[in-house]
Image (cartoon, rainbow, N blue to C red):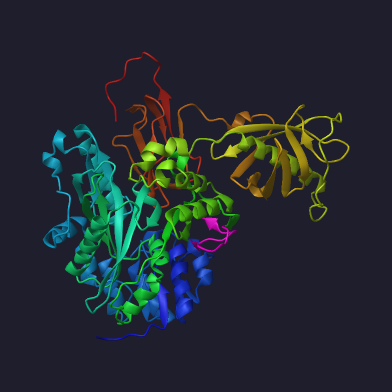
Amino acid sequence: MRRDVIQTLLVANRGEIACRIFRTCRDLGITTVAVYSDADADALHVREADLAVRLPGAAPADTYLRGDLVVAAALVAGADAVHPGYGFLSENAAFAAAVQDAGLVWVGPPVKAIELMASKTRAKELMAGAGVPLLAPVDPATAGPDDLPLLLKAASGGGGRGMRIVRELDALGGELLAAAAEAASAFGDGEVFAEPYVERGRHVEVQVMADAYDTVWALGTRDCSLQRRHQKVIEEAPAPGLDDALRARLHDAAVAAARAVGYRGAGTVEFLVSAEGRPYFLEMNTRLQVEHPVTEAVFGVDLVALQLRVAEGEPLDAVVPGASGHAVEARLYAEDPARDWQPQTGALLTLEVPDAPGLRLDTGYTGGDTIGVHYDPMLAKVIAHAPTRTAAIRLLAGALERARIHGPVTNRALLVRSLRHPDFVAGRLDTGFYDRHLPALTAPGDGAPATAALAAALAEAVAATTHGTGPAPAPSRFGAWRNVPSQPQVKRYRGEPDGTEHEIAYRTPRTGVPEPYETGSATRVVSVTPTRVTLELSGVTHHFDLAYDRDRDRVHVDTAGASYTFTALPRFTDPTTRTDPGSLLAPMPGTVVRLAEGLAPGAVVEAGQPLIWLEAMKMEHRILAPASGTLTALHAAPGHQVEVGALLAVVQERAAGAPAPEETV
């Protein structure tokens, strides 16, 4: 077989995965080449690469999805190989062929394997012939009550796009149209198929690695059941609670799937495991997975290094590496789980995760970077490896809790609560975890936010008196706050992301150090500076570290157990900030992709009816009618770019008891 030594590698991707691949290349002495859009000109993956080539434009369709531009970039930079990462063109057979036609080494599976697995419908037919267990497909045209619930899926692509759960036959037609439209928008292919929806099923997958000499490794299992919008949030290896017979069956099926398509390189075979322990083939991802670090930690391997080795024509060892311990990965997203997982944008002021044995951080961002609207909202992956599952979970939860993340709202608190939820700790996992537990996992905490707001008010009072005089003064220490008469001051904050308002009354006595105004308070002030406040609460000393975002009038408060963000509010509400009742505002910056059929001023709508679809950060978001009534204004149209807070439409609510008009959209 031909042997190719890779000297210079272009990564046809961005962000975290590009940085992760570059790390292995540095260890191997391989020169790295980045490609970047205009929106990514200052991105971390560009800063870390040895060379970089601009792809003019900002949208993925104009940049990272332009295979011709990527191949040209590899040639102009003198690269001799291309690694696709995941997402974008990683499972595009035509791109893989174009790379090879240009005389470059493709660090991925054979083109034929990509083609065979590209369509989930064709892949299932192939797997049936290989003896891999499958769910029987359902023809939507003949589906009946006994077939419910159904899962609609896009035949091409992944990431939950074009996926719908149907529980009522009356909804099937509309959901088919919506799934097909989303699939066509995301993948250029509107084919959708249906299969039975397995309630309380687990998402379990097997990592495979294959060479050109008929060696196929099955590198254990991963559980990826904790998902939002059919996209993974927390993953772990090995999948807990599987008996030896089921593990062996999954391994054998994964190897059979790889052999059936003549696979080479890294791939993942995904299964749905029913509550009764029956596995069903879902799909094969012909690329590296986002969650690959947990397998690397457990098996002590570098999957990217193995990909490069196989691409160079080298064989794998005959013996599969042994496994040790347990690993858990959490995906840190810039999104608000309490508000339908809305992605967040803006300046990322701080991103600091503790460094400790067993912890790993894979990220495409550093403090000072900006999170834009064009790409996936994942900031980083935090991975913990320990001898036992219990230890790994505890290590990861503690690291996330102590992390300092200032800027847009993230899912960090949700991750910590998920990892410590009794069901997760006990290994009671299934894909409906967040459907059942999300309200509790995103509920506001107890009195802790109010205490953090107090710390913010005290620190800002000191900061106001020392502003412009140089470094913050040394802490002022005293045994207890004095009851010295002084005029009380009031600070008002809005907590993020829950929007709770906190009004803090304090006074500044002759000591010059602010203190709570309440008499009889159990809070004792130990020390205050603009960046650190120490309070004694019911006999226990707590420290609060503060960071400021002056441009947005925000203050970030970090404690040992949680982090809080507050926006300073004026003492009195500004009436000009109010919007008319029934106004539909854009919850995020994005692009209007479609409107409800027939939507126009004068149309009659029902409460909760989807009216407008926005696309932001690779996800679609529905804007719903806030009440039943008449659409009196429409300012959105497909293709429009909108900023957060932009007025999209106005619905005039129908008076209680008034008859509904006959014509509706």
What residue appears at the point 59 percent right and 45 percent down from the top-left corner? Answer: 562
The vertical placement of 211 against 413, above or below, is below
The vertical placement of 645 against 521, above or below, is below
What residue appears at the point 37 percent right and 52 percent down from the top-left corner? Answer: 232
Chief secondary structure of the magenta portion: loop
| Residue 376 visible in the picture | no
- Given residues 377 and 645, the one toward you in this image is 377
The vertical placement of 662 against 532, above or below, is above
Q: Is residue 359 magenta?
A: yes
The quarter of the image holding the C terminus is: top left
Outermost residue on the top side: it is: 657
Magenta residues, start to end: 353-374
The vertical placement of 301 against 604, above or below, is below
State the image coordinates of residue 364 (x, y, percent, origin top left).
49, 62
Locate residue 522: give its quadrant: top right
Q: Is residue 27 magenta?
A: no
| Residue 143 visible in the picture | yes
State the image coordinates of residue 94 (x, y, percent, origin top left).
26, 69
- Given residues 100 and 138, the one toward you in this image is 138
- Relative to residue 299, is residue 511 drawn left or right? right
State the image coordinates of residue 101 (x, y, percent, origin top left).
27, 79
Tag count: 0
Locate residue 567: give its quadrant: top right
- Given residues 380 and 383, the one toward you in this image is 383
Outermost residue on the right side: it is: 510
The quarter of the image holding the N terminus is: bottom left
State the image coordinates of residue 577 (x, y, percent, origin top left).
59, 33
- Relative to residue 39, is residue 171 drawn left or right? left
